[in-house]
Amino acid sequence: MNSSPIRWAPLVVVGLTCGLVQVAVGVVLYLSGVYFEPWSLRLIIALLAVCIAAGNWWYGKHVLGGRTTYWKALVVGIVISVSMALVYITYNAISISFFYPHFLEDMVQAEFARASAGMDPAQAARLLDSLRAEVTLRNLVVGNFTAASRIGTYLSVLISLAFLQRWRRNRP
């Protein structure tokens, strides 16, 4: 059993670094014109899982000396997820406010294109109005933070189990 306490500073740095990686990928996806494609969300979730796994590996090896518990690995994953989410929503707020002012409308149009297929014009118009009312910077930021934290927690549960099994097998 590992009784060393969690060292928060290096853990938060790992989370902030993961957040910057997520931002870089988001920028590339957006500038490439594929940010709103359905597969891009799966890519972002996969990247979150990779960040949690890599962060857990680095933190476990370099900060905890290769020994951890399930609960510490879980906390590491959750802190990485929440830190990453904080970086990403900060990026959302700044980029949409100053650099991509049409982002929310692009988001509305992408969802409208997916959801309005086969609708009559009156239904489509109501859908478009509804989407424009729902897609706000506040809702985007809250939704992104909540989703990243929730999905990151689920991934952390699974990744922590995998890392704990690996560390137990490699224990001297």
Image: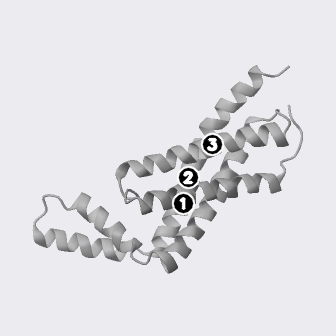
Q: Secondary structure at mark 2?
A: helix
Q: Secondary structure at mark 1?
A: helix
Residue 72 seen in the figure = no
Residue appearing at x 50%, y 47% in the figure: 45
Color scheme of the displayed model: one colour
Residue holding disc 3: 156
Report the Cα–Cα distance between label 2 and label 3: 10 Å
**Location of residue 154 (image quadrant):** top right
Residue appearing at x 34%, y 69% in the figure: 106
- Whether residue 17 is situated above or below residue 109 in the rendered picture: above
The single residue placed furthest to the left in the displayed view is 120
Dot 3 amino acid type: Ser
**Location of residue 54 (image quadrant):** top right
Lateral position of residue 116 relative to residue 78, left or right? left
- Whether residue 155 is situated above or below residue 67 in the rendered picture: below
Residue holding disc 2: 150
**Residue 58 versus residue 127: which sits nearer the camera?**
58
Graded by Cα atoms within 10 Å as few (under 14), some (14 to 19) or many (20 or more), the crowding at tag 2 reads some
Residue appearing at x 44%, y 57% in the figure: 29
Residue holding disc 1: 146
Q: Give the mark nearer the N terminus: 2 vs 3.
A: 2
Q: Secondary structure at mark 3?
A: helix
Task: Determine contact: label 2, label 3, CB under 8 Å.
Answer: no
Residue 172 % position (x, y): 86, 19
Residue 114 seen in the figure = yes
Report the Cα–Cα distance between label 1 and label 2: 6 Å
Dot 1 amino acid type: Thr
Graded by Cα atoms within 10 Å as few (under 14), some (14 to 19) or many (20 or more), the crowding at tag 1 reads some
Task: Determine contact: label 1, label 2, CB under 8 Å.
Answer: yes
Residue 81 % position (x, y): 63, 53
Report the Cα–Cα distance between label 1 and label 3: 15 Å
Lateral position of residue 171 relative to residue 76, left or right? right
